[in-house]
Image (cartoon, rainbow, N blue to C red):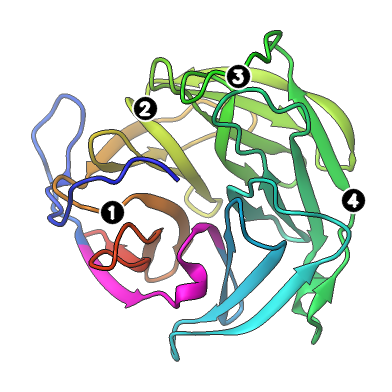
Amino acid sequence: MLCTLVLFILLGCIPREDPPERQPELQEVATLPEELNENSGMIAIDNLIWLINDSGDEPVLYGYDRNTNMVTRKVYVKNTENIDWEDITQNDHDIFIGDFGNNDGSRDDLRIIRISKTALTAATDTVAPAGLITFSYEDQTDYTPANQATRFDCEAFIATADSLILFTKDWIDYRTQLYTLPLLPGQYLAKHKRELNVEGLVTSAAYEPQTSSLYLAGYLLAPFLWIYSGFDTGDFNFSDAERIDFEDFGVQVEAIFVAADGVYVSSEKSSDLLPATLFRLQQQ
């Protein structure tokens, strides 16, 4: 992946206009196993964190156990490949893998792999997709390669009960565009819904339905986390937005999920001194 950033102190939650009101704490949970050096997305199911790696890896889901700091399951996704897996999300019934990394904006084979949760949690080392959602963006007309100069890259999405919401990684103006897709397998045009001024490059998303909170992780000069309170997955409005900046934090944030004991983020390996790591953000 791109852009190694300079790192290691959390400065705190910085609203856009008001002075900081609280100091979240970033806690290192573990150095991740080497096979997760290129991790790009994660979700939690029961007692395991399921992670994916991005382009270059096999089409594999890694079941990681926090208690032992080991990958205890590897599940191959049959009849597919990892062109550029960039995020993973879930709803009550299914898991979705976003094979939509598109750094130069030229891909015409964007897709999302749907997997039944029941199939994944069974005692197996292979799983068959429950269908593919292939798509293009309704407002993209030019597919000329433009490395890191496109509005049509994507590394983040969430699943609701009835749709998928994508958050683009906009290399041109550092905003994110929201698009929606159906959950059912098929070929679609992703529908543009709105724009958020995130002032950076979004790399992962998570949604907490109990609190209606949307989390967007990403980076520019340093990693950041946006929290949108009261986020409505139907009309895409929200009641409040705040940002946490990780100044001097020398890793690239790649994945995020929300648990009862905090928000977890991961980094990929940047160097021997900066291995892939799992962190927990505890809000006070």
Secondary structure, mark 4, is loop
Residue 198: numbered disc: 2
Cβ–Cβ under 8 Å for marks 3 and 1: no
Q: Dividing the picture into quarters, in which one does residue 155 lie?
A: top right
Q: Amino acid at mark 2?
A: Val
Name the residue beneath numbered marker 1.
251
**Horizontal and vertical percent for residue 284?**
20, 60
Name the residue beneath numbered marker 4.
131
Give whichever of 249, 157 is nearer the camera.
249
Residue 265: numbered disc: none
Q: Earlier in the sequence, mark 2 or mark 4?
A: 4
Q: Is residue 107 left or right of residue 281?
A: right
What residue is rendered at 65% in x and 18% in y? 192
Residue 145: numbered disc: 3
Secondary structure, mark 3, is loop
Cβ–Cβ under 8 Å for marks 4 and 3: no
